[in-house]
Amino acid sequence: MAQMKFLGCLFVAILLLVPLTSAKSTGFSYCNKKTDYAVKVSGLEINPYPISRSKNTSFEISATTSEAISDGKLVIGVSYFGWHIHDEDHDLCKETSCPVSVGDFVVSHSQVLPGITPPGSYSLKMTMEDGKKKQLTCITFDFSIGFIAEENLADM
């Protein structure tokens, strides 16, 4: 009986602590659900979450590839409340170790969003291409930037 009470208390403590973590595994979807991409994404983590302006934010994408990748790029498009507002390209080999062998790998990208970034709902589309511009994968996911910047909360 004491063991059940302990497990119950442990479960409640975990439920109370989980919302205080600063990273979030977020859902994503493939751009084309019918395409058999060479790179399969298995997870996406944003840290810290919620995203704050003027703070370094990292995006970590866990994936598996069925073919070796020697070079390539990430093409990122950002939409704000459904309106396309920004594009940028990144050298894949600066976001992960190249060459990428067949199997599991992680793509990590960090970026500081400008202090003038407006709060609200955003969508991000990330396409991975090899050096010959062959599309290896394409995912989309949503995120938000709060109305109150994190650094302002500390001042309250």
Image (cartoon, grey):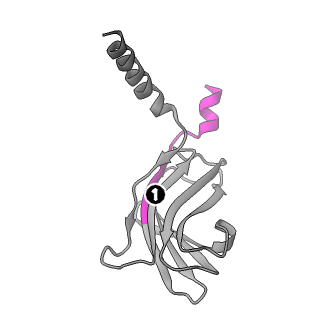
Label 1 belongs to which residue?
43
| Residue found 61% across the figure and 51% down from its top | 57
Magenta segment, which residues? Answer: 140-156
> Where residue 85 sits: x, y (%)?
52, 68
Res. 80 visible in picture: no
Image height check: is 73 above or below 141? below
Identify which residue is drawn at 61% across, 86% down: 131
Judged from this view, the residue extending furthest toward the right is 94
- Report the quarter where the C terminus lies: top right
150 or 57: nearer the viewer? 57
Closest to the observer, 6 or 37:
6
Magenta stretch: includes residue 133 = no
Q: Position of residue 99 (x, y in %)?
A: 65, 76
Q: Along the horizontal axis of the image, is 110 left or right of 28?
A: right
Categorize mark 1 by other alpha carbons within 10 Å: few (<14), some (14-19), many (20+).
some
- SS state under label 1: strand
Question: What amino acid is labelled 1 in the image?
Answer: Gly
Nearest to the observer: residue 2 or residue 152: 2
